[in-house]
Amino acid sequence: MLRDIINAVLGVIIGVILGDPLKEAWGKFVKYMKRLLAKPKTIKDPSYFTIGNETTSFIVCDGDGVMTYSPENIETRVNNHAVELPSDLKILRREIEKTEDAKKQRGESYSWNGPLLSLEKYSILRTKVNEDMKVIFSFVPSDYYTFKALNMNLDKQLPSGYTIREKYLAGNTVRQPIPALANGVGVAITVITSDNYVILTKRSPESGVRPNELDISVVEAIHPSHDRKAVGQGPDLFNTAVRGAEEELGVVIPRENIKFLGFGVDEQYYQWNIIGIAHCKEKAEEIMKQRSRGIPGKWEMEQILFIPFKIRDVLYTIKNEKMWSTAKVALYWSLVFEYTKRGVDKEAERLFK
């Protein structure tokens, strides 16, 4: 305020003494200095997925919840060359390997080092005729110990003083993935029962990642051999979804019931997932009975829950329950696929205030 008064007084004095042309020049100079000295505004990165006024840690690479990938428009490849970890990351992985091996020798519960895939690169395309979504994924071999050592410790300080996140994930790592860290690529599927409930799961306390958190129906890492296509070495993502639903929920979902809506990366753990929706023929009560008789992946989940698959019920869950960003995006896209984007966003504006 005081500065503006001084500028006005000086403008009047200069205008009287020197005339209008110099007065105009002085005004331009004052405006220039104001712009030069003004504090820069902090603007949130618009690339992060938002629901209402809530910003997640998920970045969408392709998809909007409306369009889908048909099976023939998802191409996968596996390049069987090992990713050479930088020396500081290699040390962290060896530490995990020694720790888990020591647990095994003592007869304690330990993490098994299962095979995983890491995302090397991807190409987003559109078909020539209808401009349908198309994508090509290129993977390289990885394993669970690498994921546990690195992705679960992105904020761990390295000897250099930087964290893994600061040293290796600073800058744009979305268009060009970092294969050493893009471990455990998977599918994230929202499953809807025949009586219109969405299946949610609560992760067990023993889960390696996000223990005790609420999650969507199926989150399954792509397995290099179990999910392999009938022809070629690349994985079939529909196989991953079918296997995950059977292991974690005890339901068999026909491939044609699975719709992949898009993919992206959750920067919390730098975890890449292809997101989809599927309808199963079972009712909620039938799935609970099936679970009581035992399923292969029951140990991974503390319990399963069912909420009405209605816009307000699902958005209320997204807003009030603790869950990772990928789950929120999957639930939102599933609503958009079933109920239209306009209807979902209109309700989200009212609920997320």
Image: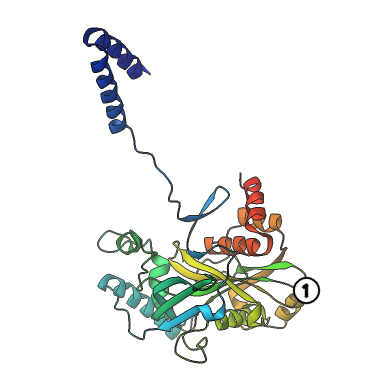
**Percent from the top left, x then y, of residue 262?**
53, 68
Of 19 and 179, nearer the camera is 19
Q: Is residue 19 above or below residue 260?
A: above
Of 109 and 12, nearer the camera is 12
Quadrant placement of the N terminus = top left
**Which residue is rendered at x = 34% and y = 73% of the image?**
180
Left or right of 183, for residue 248: right
Left or right of 221, for residue 216: right
Of 212 and 263, nearer the camera is 263
**Which residue is rendered at x = 30% and y = 62% of the image?**
167
Q: Please give the count of numbered marks on the rendered protein.
A: 1
Secondary structure type for disc 1: helix
**Percent from the top left, x then y, of residue 127?**
50, 74
**Which residue is rendered at x = 65% and y = 61% of the image?**
335
Quadrant placement of the C terminus = top right
Residue 110 visible here: no
Disc 1: CA contacts within 10 A as few (<14), some (14-19) or many (>=20): few
Q: Residue furthest top?
A: 16
Q: Residue furthest bottom?
A: 231
Q: How is the image coloured?
A: rainbow
Q: Quadrant of residue 179?
A: bottom left
Question: Which residue type does callout 1 highlight?
Answer: Glu
Residue 88 visible here: yes
Q: Quadrant of residue 164?
A: bottom left
**Percent from the top left, x then y, of residue 66?**
60, 64
Left or right of 270, for residue 327: right
Q: Which residue is mark 1?
A: 285
Q: Residue furthest front?
A: 129
**Percent from the top left, x then y, of residue 80?**
36, 86
